[in-house]
Image (tube, helix red, strand yellow):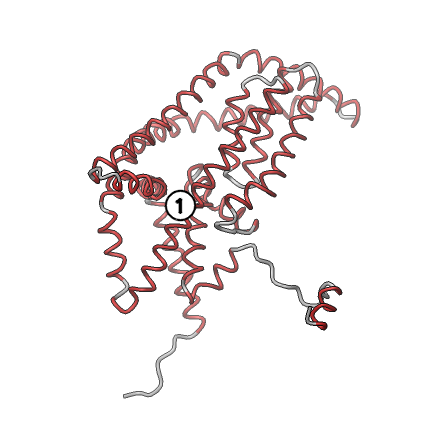
């Protein structure tokens, strides 16, 4: 027997890692029509798990408990969809008027900017016309693909409840498979990781839902006070976009500002919206997120932005919404596996002490005095 174990060189490990990463990303991209609905179903199933257990504790049959939980969820989603659809219908009826008003405001802005920056207004209009022509040309080629995506999306929409029901029903089988996969010697560690991860994920996802509800209420109230039309629609859309960190917040504030410019006589309303939304973001980032969401899972801004952009490139808009919850799940697993803890630390927002920066003098004095 050889006493020395065979060790793989570093360059070979790196090559294997990147090849495996490339294969994984390729599979995720090619099979997105299968994977994305399942990921949505798993996330919703994790959210519904406590509700199902509640009904089971009431001595209701497991299948009936899952069906009731799923029915309540569908009714809530349908109710929200009907509300958004009714608001969107009113918005679409007023769309021509809004376009006309916004065009007038836009022309006034062009006249002001051309005089202030000494630019010929004809050149500005020419740039806008060329951009609009290119957009329409590209848009026509995408119409057919968009219709196909909508059709496939409707099919997937009906499959997700089936996935959720089966995941909740076969939960004991899936958990037992997970335990058997890692062998009997690791049962205690696997059980601890599964339990903690499931609990923290549930709290994190519930925290996201609560955060979205609070932000929606604040934005709707602010828009109603300012007298902005379609406040309910804009507030809900803003709260949903707020789930996408940084990028979603910019889009969320741009929409009501455009409506204010098109419907109000003064441009100051757009400024008021910008200021109020900034205050709401401060409240969200400094109170709501730390107390409700980030206390469960802490992810730094760098990887939040990277994963949102990567999610959009990989799966489109659904990928942007799924990116943060999936990253949170990955971080939770990293934090509970000893070999992967450095990666979990890298994804977190705990800043180490920077070398060369002196600590607080009072703390040093207290330390010397053992206070």
State the residue at coordinates (49%, 32%).
213
268 left or right of 327 in image: right
- Corner quadrant of residue 43: top left
247, above or below 81, in the image: below
Which part of the image, by quadrant, shows the N terminus? bottom left
Residue that mark 1 sits on: 202
Residue 329 position within the rendered picture, expressed as x and y whole percent measured from the top left: 41, 51
- Name the residue rendered at 38%, 78% in the picture: 7
Locate the C terminus and report the quarter of the image it occupies. bottom right
Front in this rendered view, residue 285 or 112: 285
At a point 62% along the width and 13% down the height, the residue shown is 101
Query: How many tags in the picture?
Result: 1
Decide: is 322 above or below 72. Answer: below
Image position, residue 36 (x, y; %): 35, 41
> For mark 1, does the 10 Å Cα neighbourhood hold few (<14), some (14 to 19), or many (20 or more) residues?
many
Decide if residue 113 is on the left or right side of residue 65.
right
Q: Nearer the viewer, residue 96 or 167?
A: 167
């Amino acid at each position: 027997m050889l006493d020395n174990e065979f060790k793989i060189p570093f360059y070979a490990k790196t090559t294997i890692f990147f090849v495996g990463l490339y294969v994984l990303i390729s599979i995720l991209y090619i099979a997105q029509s299968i994977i994305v609905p399942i990921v949505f179903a798993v996330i919703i199933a994790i959210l519904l798990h406590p509700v199902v257990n509640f009904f089971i504790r009431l001595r209701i049959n497991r299948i009936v408990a899952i069906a009731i939980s799923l029915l309540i969820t569908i009714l809530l989603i349908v109710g929200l969809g009907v509300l958004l659809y009714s608001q969107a219908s009113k918005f679409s009826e007023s769309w021509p008027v809004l376009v006309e008003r916004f065009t007038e405001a836009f022309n006034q802005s062009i006249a002001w900017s051309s005089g202030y920056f000494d630019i010929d207004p004809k050149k500005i209009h020419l740039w806008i016309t060329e951009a609009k022509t290119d957009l329409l040309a590209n848009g026509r080629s995408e119409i057919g693909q968009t219709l196909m995506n909508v059709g496939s999306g409707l099919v997937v929409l009906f499959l997700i409840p089936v996935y959720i029901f089966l995941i909740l029903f076969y939960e004991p089988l899936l958990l037992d498979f997970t335990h058997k996969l890692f062998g009997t010697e690791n049962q205690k560690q696997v059980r601890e990781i599964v339990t903690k991860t499931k609990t923290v994920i549930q709290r994190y996802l519930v925290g996201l839902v609560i955060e979205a509800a609070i932000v929606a209420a604040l934005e709707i109230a602010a828009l109603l006070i300012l007298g902005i039309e379609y406040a309910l629609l804009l507030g809900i859309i803003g709260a949903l976009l707020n789930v996408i960190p940084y990028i979603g917040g910019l889009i969320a504030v741009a929409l009501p500002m455009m409506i204010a410019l098109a419907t109000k006589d003064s441009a100051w309303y757009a400024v008021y919206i910008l200021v109020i939304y900034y205050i709401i973001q401060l409240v969200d980032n400094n109170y709501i997120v730390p107390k409700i969401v980030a206390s469960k899972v802490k992810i730094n801004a760098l990887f939040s932005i990277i994963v949102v952009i990567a999610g959009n490139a990989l799966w489109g808009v659904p990928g942007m919404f799924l990116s943060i919850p999936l990253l949170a799940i990955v971080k939770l697993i990293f934090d509970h596996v000893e070999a992967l803890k450095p990666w979990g630390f890298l994804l977190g927002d705990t800043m180490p002490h920077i070398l060369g920066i002196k600590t607080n003098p009072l703390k040093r004095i207290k330390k010397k005095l053992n206070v």
